[in-house]
Amino acid sequence: MRKLILATVFVVALSGAAAAQAGGSQSSSDIPNMGRAPLQENGVGKLDARVSDESGNPVKGVYLKLESSRSDGFFCESWNTTDERGVAVLPPLHMGRLRLIVKAKGYYDQKLDVDASTLGEPYRVTLKKK
C-alpha cells in the first residue's frame, strides 16, 4: 500500500511539472536575455530586441538591421526578424557607433541610435501604426 501511495504522489508530481513547462505563453519579460554588451571599443556584442505595438502586444515578422560604424574604419551589420513573441536576437558583431533600422508592414519605419553599453539587457522597440 505504501508503494502505491508513493508511486501515485510521484506520478502526480511529474504531471504537474510537465504541465507547468508546457502551459501558457511566455511574456517577453520571461524570455531569457541573449544580448551582450561589448567589453571594449569595437568589441563583439549582440542585440536582443523585443518589439511590440503601442498596446504592448508582440509583433511577429519585424525586420531589424543593426549597422555598426567602427572607430577603426570598418563597417559591420547584422539582421534578423522577430518571432511570434516579438523577439529577434541578431548575430554578434564588432560594435562601434550603432544604428538600428526597424521595418514592419503596417508600421512606420524607425532608425534608432543605440548605445552599445546598454545591450546587456533586451533592447525594447515600440512600433507605431501608419
Image (tube, grey):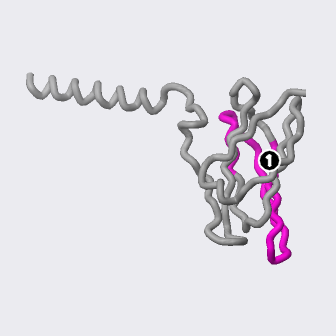
Q: Position of residue 124 (x, y in %)?
A: 69, 41
Residue 42 lies left or right of residue 68; in this view the side is left
Q: Which residue is mark 1?
A: 64
Q: Quadrant of the C terminus?
A: top right
Q: In the rendered structure, does residue 87 fall within the stretch colored magenta? A: yes
Q: Going 62% across and 54% down the picture, which residue do you hit?
A: 35
**Residue 104's quadrant in the figure?**
top right
In this view, the residue in front, 126 or 14, is: 126
Q: Quadrant of residue 84?
A: top right
Q: Is residue 78 magenta?
A: yes
Q: Looking at the image, which is closer to me, 48 or 97?
A: 97
Q: How many marks are shown on the rendered structure?
A: 1
Residue 40 lies, in percent from the top left, at 65, 71
Residue 40 versus residue 27 in the image, above or below: below
Q: Secondary structure at mark 1?
A: strand
Q: Residues within 10 Å of mark 1 (few under 14, many from 20)?
A: many
Identified at 81% across, 44% down, the residue is: 63
- Point out residue 118 in the picture as x, y percentages from the top left corner: 65, 54
Asked if residue 43 is positioned above or below residue 37 in the image, the reply reads below
Magenta residue span: 63-89
Task: Name the kind of residue labelled 1 in the image.
Answer: Leu
Q: Is 123 displayed left or right of 98 in the figure?
A: left
Q: Locate residue 1: give its quadrant.
A: top left
